Image: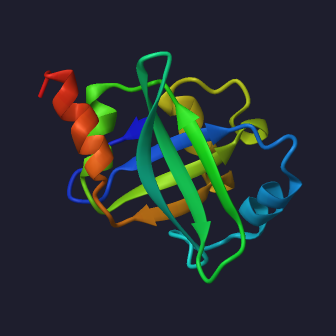
Amino acid sequence: MLFPRQDEPSVIVLVVDDSADHEITARVASEGNVPSEHFGGVWGTGRRDGCWLLAFQLIELGGGVERKWFTDNIYRELLGAILEVPHYLALMPSEIAGDARTRDDVLPRLGGALFVQVDHRSPQVERVLAARGDT
């Protein structure tokens, strides 16, 4: 989900299933800074069954936790927001997101997300946007 903001970096919300990953659950719960001082991240791409996938890799600065999540929910506005740097990625555990599906439902739950500032433009995402031909 995308939260564009005028004159400030956009926020991209990525809901992740953390039910089997207690380490990432604990890290998200213990992080209090926005954006996080302990984590960074990068975007990339892949393909499955001939279709594009977007990937976000969370990286603990200084070593430690690394996780990668994929989505096939790729739309032009999301690609554009990913290519605008800096932007924030709000990593929201599925248990916090619950049944929220709209921006109005997600917004009050953002306090339970891990915010990561993304400063690097992804050449892989640029290629996906160019391949779509709808720019």
Return the x and y of residue 4 as percentages of the image width and height.
31, 43
Return the x and y of residue 64 as percentages of the image width and height.
72, 74
Q: Residue at x 53, y 69 (%)?
A: 34
Q: Quarter-wise, where is residue 25 in the image? A: bottom right
Asked if one can make out residue 109 in the rendered structure from this viewpoint, the answer is: yes
Asked if one can make out residue 5 in the rendered structure from this viewpoint, the answer is: no
Q: Residue furthest top?
A: 49
Q: Which color scheme did the rendering employ for the protein?
A: rainbow
Return the x and y of residue 86 as percentages of the image width and height.
31, 63
Front residue of this view, candidates 98 and 27: 27
State the quadrant of the C terminus. Answer: top left
Q: Residue at x 50, y 69 (%)?
A: 35
Q: Please count the marks in the image.
A: 0
Q: Residue at x 51, y 31 (%)?
A: 104
Q: Residue furthest bottom?
A: 62
Q: Residue at x 67, y 40 (%)?
A: 16
Residue 134's place in the image compared with 64, above or below, is above
Q: Is residue 96 left or right of residue 5?
A: right
Return the x and y of residue 84 as percentages of the image width and height.
24, 53
